[in-house]
Amino acid sequence: MNRVQHYSHLLQSLLHNCNTENRLLHIGILGLDSADKIESLIIAFNQIQQSDTLYAQHRIHISLLAGLITKPHCISDLINITLNLTSTLDSDRHELVIAPIEGCQRINIFSNITLDCHFGEPIKQLTGIANHSHRVCHWFACSNTLQADTKDHFYTSAALWQMGRLSDDLTAISFAESQPEHIDNRIVNLVKHCGFHVASDTQPVMTKADEIACKERQALRNQQDHQYAYLGNYQSTPCLPPKDKETNNNNDCIGIIGGGIAAASLALSLAERGKNVVIYCKDSAIAQAASGNKQGAIYPLLTPENGPLSQFYQQAFLYSRQRVQLMEKNELRIGHRFCGVLHTGFDQRSQARLDKIIDGQEWPSEIGVKVSAKQASLIAGVEIPQDGFFYPMGGWICPFEMAQASIDYAMLIGHQHNCNINLKLNCRISQIHQTDTGWALSSVDPTGNTNIIAQHKQLIVASGAELTSYQQTAKIPLSGFRGQVSHVPATGELANLATVICANGYLTPANNNIHCVGASYVKNPSNMDFSLTEQLANGEKMKQSFPNAKWPTDIDVSSNDARVGIRMVSRDHFPVMGIAPDIDALLAKYQEQLQSKDKPSQWQKYWQHTPAANYDGLYLLGGFGSRGLSSAPLVAECLAANLCGEIAPINLPTQALLSGNRMWMRKLLKGKAL
């Protein structure tokens, strides 16, 4: 029996025995010794789908816990195999990137096949994964996990119990296609102690659960829920397969208010899960607000210490790249070039800040490399008279084309999965209010009357600058910043620009003979009108950044061609994602605390372990600032996973940093006053 046949036999057993009403098979893999095993697993799954119509609509999710990165060639093999599976042909797609960075990198190989690559200490990766309903139904352990220098990383009691927390009661482990008698007895005994069955060819699946182990696993799930209780109900019950199209009504659909990158990305991620979606866009076309620019830069936001913010943006921008590549593969046009981003200082302070980033870490070459002035000039195609930091996998994307392609692809997938993706244009939602069955959406008709036009059990506000326009969302701590981007003709030396430049502002290579330069940054703007002052300031940004170079004089803003948008920004630079907090209820409870005679430590414990007040069924997605292209697709994917009870691509500690109540809870959890 070859490897594909072996996996096919096992997958058929799992599909037959696992609860597959939600059409998702979740497989875990420990270690990474040979990427072709993943290829064989996916080929086996595809063959089953093609031969048995019962499983034609099923999806497979593979969670790869690769451990510490000691064999970079395995990552290269994984990239090559992923490319082979997708049968890509055009030149841009060979740049699929799986970088050796801490945390999870999600790869949507097809709309029905997802691969999560977790790099780092296994116990740290496992404990960071949130509880979810679609648990792992089988684990494959690669041979490298059994080696003397790695087995103590994978086969510890703590790691195995965390694997159990994420697994079904009847989940088994297969050891590198070996029979149990060939495995170290200590490992086999520990695996069994933690409630796993060791699979063999004669008994590939488990038939009876260990009741004691099941109770231990549930205790761990309860422990995590207790630890993160302050997030509120951050997950929802898993979605069921869509009903027949003819019987659908709005209560069976998820509602999304918005029409930009965030809303479109969320619609796509939900479509891939077979959800019915209605998008309410206030404009006559999508991406008419901040997502409507001609070009936007995509690159990670790094910090010297490479903390949670920096790690989040590395994972997010790589996912955005991959989303563009997946849609292009499906013949959806998105203007873009992954030509890299060159980051330089423009004064002493900015140069010192950049130097701290460069020297703070040994950054993987896929993320960023230090370059000399000579190297920078060769990369840029124009003179760059100073050293810089080059993000080779960055570049620019056309935001409104990405939003349109995301909607189009969502509709295509929806048709394949028998679910509706409905876009309602010229539909401004003026009010939302909670009912016994969910959320009612109201709109003002042409006569000036306000009418309820729809109801949804689950509603997401992803409306960019208008995210805080509803009574329930008004206190979310986001500020609006006006940004005017200038469009300038490609003339002279400027036309040779071959990479995005980020210095005092940014400048893109030409697309259709037009460069984008900007942007202004004005807090709480009074209007969206064209500003001559901001236009002239944009024209000076590159001259101020490179005063000794000649090419910036070719930047001509005299045509007054520009576009203005409002970007919603948080103080800590994280976006907002998750269930909408009830800030009024939170502040009322805080006032109760101030009036009580209880010790501060008692209230600290209260805030740590009591579910936060929130609006059940109402969710937020926004606050992306000027980095929506780099982060919105991953955050939308995370929210979609949470809504459907699936494993999320963002770990739980980072999800806590995205929570809409984080500014208040950060203090209350420490026992501090607001």
Image (spheres, rainbow, N blue to C red):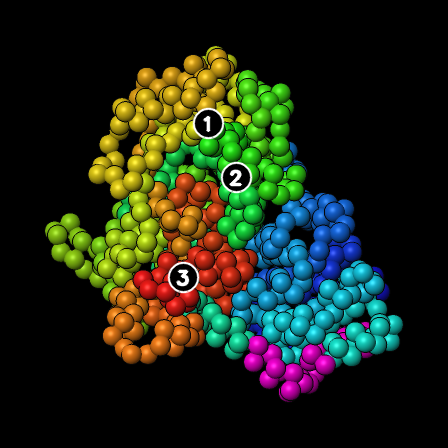
Real-space Cα separation, disc 2 to disc 1, in angstroms: 21 Å
Residue located 42% across and 66% down the image: 670
Residue type at mark 1 is: Asp
Residue 474 can be seen in this image: yes
Question: In the rendered image of this protein, does residue 188 appear above or below residue 482?
Answer: below
Q: Name the foreground residue: 22 vs 128.
A: 128
Provide the residue designation for mark 1: 347
Question: In the rendered image of this protein, does residue 361 appear above or below residue 351?
Answer: below
Residue located 84% across and 73% down the image: 184
Residue located 32% across and 17% down the image: 558
Q: Which residues are magenta?
A: 193-220
Residue density around tag 2, few if under 14, some if 14–19, many if 20 or more, within 10 Å: many
Percent position of residue 46, x then y: 67, 58
Question: In the rendered image of this protein, does residue 618 appear above or below residue 20?
Answer: above
Percent position of residue 368, x then y: 60, 37
Residue density around tag 3, few if under 14, some if 14–19, many if 20 or more, within 10 Å: some
